[in-house]
Image (cartoon, rainbow, N blue to C red):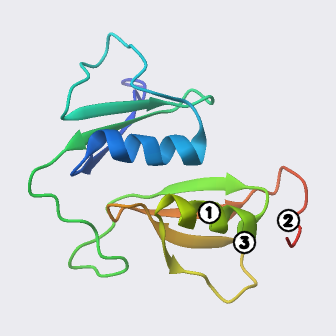
């Protein structure tokens, strides 16, 4: 092993706003003091309860991925485990996410884009209670 993962950094046009979107989705603390990073208008962080840190970096000429267009690939995506896909979908859409692929209704995941176009998946968490229809 060479090192430890410190955080995952997402390029975006507005770091604080995207950090707040992911805080609403994952919980945690936006811009928690941390000696590893300097917080300013061009950089924001989200320390989640699981210990994962997401960072958000301003890019002036940000060009969002166009899923599933290989000319502008997703580059990476986050899988977020949820107990109930339908309920979680309503919640992320209300936060500003966009549904990219709902699937055929039989699979355990759906694809979304955050408010600036980064793809992420909501995945049925098989370690929790059964996915109930609501």
Image side of residue 123 versus residue 10, left or right: right
Task: Say above or below: 86 vs 18.
Answer: below
Rendered-image quadrant of the C terminus: bottom right
Q: Earlier in the sequence, mark 2 or mark 3?
A: 3
Image position, residue 101 (x, y; %): 53, 81
Say whether residue 69 is left or right of residue 79.
Answer: left
Mark 2 or mark 1: whose residue is earlier in sequence: 1
Hey, which quadrant is residue 54 in on the image?
top left
In this rendering, the answer to whether 13 lies above or below 32 is: below
Q: Pointers 2 and 3 in contact (CB under 8 A)?
A: yes
Q: Are marks 2 and 1 in contact (CB under 8 Å)?
A: no
Furthest residue toward left: 61
Q: Secondary structure at mark 3?
A: loop
In front: mark 2 or mark 3? Answer: 2
Q: For the point 25% across and 49% down, which residue is it?
A: 11
Q: Which residue is mark 3?
A: 108
Marker disc for residue 122 = 1
Q: Secondary structure at mark 2?
A: loop
Q: Residues within 10 Å of mark 3 (few under 14, many from 20)?
A: some
Disc on res. 131: 2
Q: Residue furthest bottom?
A: 104
Q: Could you tell me how far apart the alpha carbons at marks 2 and 1 are, in whole angstroms?
A: 12 Å
14 is higher (above) or lower (below) than 118:
above
Q: Residues within 10 Å of mark 1 (few under 14, many from 20)?
A: many
Q: Is residue 78 above or below residue 3?
A: below
């Amino acid at each position: 092993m060479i090192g430890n993962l410190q955080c995952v950094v997402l390029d975006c046009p507005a770091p604080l706003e995207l950090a707040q979107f992911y805080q609403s989705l994952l919980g945690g603390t936006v811009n928690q003091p941390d000696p590893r990073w300097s917080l300013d208008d061009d950089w924001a962080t989200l320390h989640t309860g699981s210990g994962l840190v997401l960072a958000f970096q301003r890019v002036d000429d940000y060009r969002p991925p166009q899923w599933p267009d290989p000319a502008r690939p997703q580059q990476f995506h986050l899988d977020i485990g949820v107990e109930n896909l339908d309920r979680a979908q309503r919640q992320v859409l209300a936060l500003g996410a966009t549904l990219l692929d709902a699937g055929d209704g039989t699979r355990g995941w759906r694809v979304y884009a955050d408010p600036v176009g980064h793809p992420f998946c909501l995945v049925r968490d098989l370690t929790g209670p059964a996915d109930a229809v609501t």
